[in-house]
Amino acid sequence: MAVTAVDGEFVRRLQKEEEVQRSRKDSRRPRYSKFSQQELSSCKPLLTPRCTVVLFVLVGATCILIGMYALYASWSVVELVNRYDTFCVMKHATSANPLTTNEEKSAYMKNYNKQKNCTITMEIDKLMTPPIYVYYQLGNYFQNHRRYVKSKSERQLRGLPPSSSELNDCKPQDTANGQVIIPCGLIAWSLFNDSFDFSIDDFSSDNGTIFINKTAISWKSDREERFNNTVFPTNFPNNNRTTLANASQIGGASLDENLPLNRHEDLMVWMRTAALPTFRKIYGRIETDLVPGTRLTVNINNFYNTYGFGGSKKLVLSTVSWVGGRNDFLGLSYVVVGCVCIFIGLTFMYLHWKHPRPLGDRSHLSWVRKNAANSRVTS
Amino acid sequence: MKRLVHINDRGGHRDSQNHCSNKISNTKYNIFNFIPKNLWEQFSRFMNKYFLLIATLQLWPLITPVSPVSTWGPLLAIFAVSATKEAWDDYGRYCSDKEFNEKLVWVVKNGVKTRIQAQEIEVGDLVWLLENDEIPCDMVLLGTAEPLGLCYIETAAMDGETDLKTRVIPGPCHGLTSAQLLNIKGMIECPEPDKDILRFDARVRLFPPFPGDELSPLGVKNTLLQCCYLRNTEWACGVAVYTGNETKIGMSKGIAEPKLTAADAMLDKLTTALFICQIVVVMILGLAGNVWNNYEKDKTWYLRFPKKSEWYDFIVIPLRFELLCSIMIPISVKVSLDLAKSVYSKYIDWDIQMYDAVTDTPAKAANTAISEDLGQIEYILTDKTGTLTENMMIFKRCCINGVYYGNFNGDALTDQHLMHSVTEKVSAVVKFVMVMTINNTVVPNMSRENGRLTYKAQSQDEEALVQAAAQLGMVLFSKKGSVVEVNFLGHTMEFEILQVLEFTSDRKRMSVVVRDHSTGGLYLLTKGADETVFRRVRAGEPVQQVADAIDQYSQLGLRTLCFAWRDLDEQEYVAWTAKFNEASAALTDRELKIAEVSELLEKDLELLGASAIEDKLQDGVPETIASLRKAGINFWLLTGDKQTTAIQVARACNFIMAEPEGQLLKIEGSTPSDVADSIEGVLQTFCINNSENKNIAFVIDGLSLEIALKYHKEAFAKLALLIRTALCCRVTPSQKAELVGLVKSCDYRTLAIGDGGNDVKMIQEAHVGVGISGREGLQASRAADYSFGKFKFLKRLILVHGRYSYNRSAFLAQYSIYKSLVICFVQILFSFISGVSGTSLFNSFSLMAYNVAYTSIPVMVTSLLDKDLSERTVMQHPEILYFAQAGRLINPSTFAGWFLRSIFHLFYGVPAFGGVRQRRYLLHTESNPELWEAQWHV
């Protein structure tokens, strides 16, 4: 590394001039400062070929190491995924109603009187230690749609009367029967309402039932700031869906009107809208070990209709590591970048060995080459 | 059109005329039109219009993705800043106007002097000025305290010249007492207001009982112009002819057109391209969005699309995308560029290495917006006198009557022969010295305290001549009106200057008609450029001899003047005077007519000899020219001097090379066909010799240049571009500007550098104008974009400041667009996975944070401090400038590079976005890894 120094001779000259100037009082001479003279000390690393090669190889090696570590962490995560949407509805298929098309499935879901529950099993083949997170994963579901994202009233959630523009955004879920809906908007209205019960012994005894902890699954800031404990769900349309007529009006879960908004963990999770059309949302935590060989039985109330638009529903159980859930991308990208760096480093090394050039060789400067070319033409 | 001014006649004839009041106003706005006018001006720029369009669209809540505040905020801030700056400048102008307008002056009302505010002066008022008063309006001088009707004014505010100029009262007013003046009545016929401060072709007539009931001529000599100061004169009075903004100086004021740099122009083009690209993207997305809606609308129950669609639905989605993509052209480009450029110009102001200790002049960047153009200069057009040379004239040699003086010791003043000839009173020598002493506009000034004699002169040459004459024993010690007193070897001689045939750039000579009071002889004394004087000498004079001398002097790089003499015949003179007076009183083409009449007298001259004056080269000039030329910059020398002198100076400062490395081709001729042949010949010679790697230059004089520019512009332009070095001699100020225009029209970046009033036009015409604050006044440096004390600083200005500014601006502009492109592309990609609905991926806050905190501040710091190469490296290897000159740092291909880079970073970043999404929660916006990635790349 070479640090550019201020030209010594120039400094001396300056000092001399400075003395002359001091004797002259009202001089218009600009003041000297390192900034104004653009002389702030700087560091300019000299990137020689050797230095470059070493740098590339070092960076590459570091990247690979970090990547390996991340990959290892990711691989240590145990993840079980089970897609249940088709299975759960097909279970109720009859020869009269084969439920082969999406439309048929959707119509079946809309029928309030039909059976919607089903049971799936999940094999544990690796030890899962708590906290084990239970997620549901939706596919092809556009929570990021502009109509959807905006359709809520933050003021309302905080306990203030919603502004008119917010209410406008909430349309068509802004009012019902002339009264403002709390919470208004499409997001709250379409709250996910499948439910899952876990057991290790087919629910044959209460002992086998696994407790799902559904507290503290939302953001802390949501519970404490964004959602207010004085606001209770009011006039919420999903709560009035008891009659046959209302049943066909699809929508999401109902909300307990006796609990303030900040106790509705599922709602708070749901209202953190996902950025991508395929997303996972937390359902709860299992706080016991799941040992290999265990066969989990899950009772599912398959209420949520994703059939009409070809969406998917999955149930996910996952442990975590420092990289989060199962996520190989971070580690892989580090490894790939590391490999590329090392490859580039080695290529440079080869090139330098094949065509060495002394440091400070000026023969390749554009004007030197131009002159050389000229003289060749003339000679 | 003529203007009739009734002198001292308030309330009389005046009602019929509608002249403006003497209230001057330099302000651009008033309190009512400020906001609309300022906004109108700001919106004349494409970028601002675009920003306004976006901000307006955002007011429609149906389509706006983010809160309108995030656009309106910065937009209003920018407009507020520009408007405040304008308002502040304008307020400053208003205050100085007000001070000027409310200054109290003495004006004669009904024969009584009263004190009124300057703004209440009306055309025709008699204004009474005291010593050191500022002149409140353009006036015709009518009376002064001096018995000879003279007064002195300082015109520094007008033309930057610090010497005192004399003004005289017109003929009819001579001898009027101040009591008479109070009641003077008369009429002045003058042209409509114009801005030519060197011309005032008017006539005056006094009404009885005052003498001179006939029209007598008025000229600039009789005027007192606004903004000048009365000096060395107890009082003076005059009649207001032009008032307020109609004065000469008021008319010539104007706010200079802003200059657009090459990089700016390029940026404009690129922005427009980007805008088109944006429109295309918006249309595609809009279409896709409508298609998506059509297919998915009935299925996605959770979105609950309304059953009935509105007529404007199909346009809503494209408009939403327009708003989302509007960040493609970020406001921050403009803001950060403006900010950075003003700092670059401050660096120039602060640069100690461009401070000239001798004259105590720091460098000054008057134009803060064009520093990157300095790095792209391809042609430098330079003046010679005062720019390349010191403009400190010293009389060195002379040749009188065939005898060379000063040839042995290099200084005629110490040449014993000359001293001897003077004391012997050799006729030719005495005549020669007399012309030196009398034929000039020098004002001697005897100091009251110590009796020391100083000279104030407009021309450095004249001062040098008078000084030299004084050393030779003929001392000019007093000039009172037309009477000149000279002390010649102890005897006082008195001359009366009867007529002055002034120097003009066309005549290139000056003559005076004097009467020797002791002998009563009548003489015409002439000095001027050799070719004009030779043409007018009588037959049989030793023209060749003098021409040889002049040639010899020019070879040495000395400035030469020819001196001539003529004994006049009384009758001839009287006859001629009538014609001259007639010409002087002409209202149109006065200059031309005077020149014609003057020629009648300036003939059959007796040639006395020639003088040679040295003008030293400034230090560092050859080195500066050599290294700037190495940097690929071509030089043209434009001078009013003679060809031989110019060639000598050009040789001395590395401008042209002697054989065999260089070759100088001449273009000459006095008819269009001659010039055409000459140009053709030069072109052919050039083509033959070009392969030999020679430094070929061409030289042309003013006359041929005029013909070339008039008849053979294309051929000349071709030649000018092929041959990179040119000497243009004997050129006028407007020709200089024309040459700059010629080079400019061939798409080259030009820099004009000069020091005198004659360079102002060319400085204003060039892309970058540089003024040397020299001895010829401050005119040039006032008109210039940059000014400093010495020519050699040009090297640093271009190689260091210009190059850094260009590199930094190019980086800053493109980076600002790049970072916006990245975030915009992410947004576009996101649109495809959000149902093409126009959801904003970023909320207002994170957008703002991205634009300001993450990406603007770091890059701003970089572009203020970055030095890709050290100053020393660049100064030692000027060739490095090629890169900047060719515009290699901001052009469509570099821009495409940045564009591709942003796409690469998009695809590099988005998988990361997808990859890390499976964290415990999907964060909404801030977790975009693109931000970190982009940051990492800074």
Image: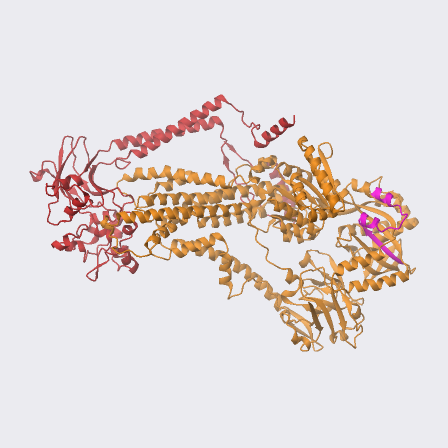
Chain colours: A red, B orange
Residue B582 in the image: state x and y as whole percent: 80, 64
Quarter of the image where one finds residue B9: bottom right
Where, quadrant-wise, is the C terminus of chain B in this rendering? top left
Is B65 drawn above or below residue B656 in the view shown? below
Q: Residue furthest top?
A: A354
Residue B476 in the image: state x and y as whole percent: 83, 55
Q: Give the range drawn in magenta.
A: B522-549
Is A233 drawn above or below residue A102 in the view shown? below
Residue B331 in the image: state x and y as whole percent: 45, 50
Q: Which residue is drawn at 68% across and 57% down?
A: B159
Tell me: B90 left or right of B831: right
Q: Looking at this view, is B854 or B604 the one in front?
A: B604
Q: Residue furthest front?
A: B673
Q: Looking at this view, is A13 or B696 the one in front?
A: B696
Where, quadrant-wise, is the N terminus of chain B in this rendering? bottom right
Q: Looking at this view, is B385 or B572 the one in front?
A: B572
Q: Looking at this view, is A367 or B929 the one in front?
A: A367
Residue B894 in the image: state x and y as whole percent: 49, 39
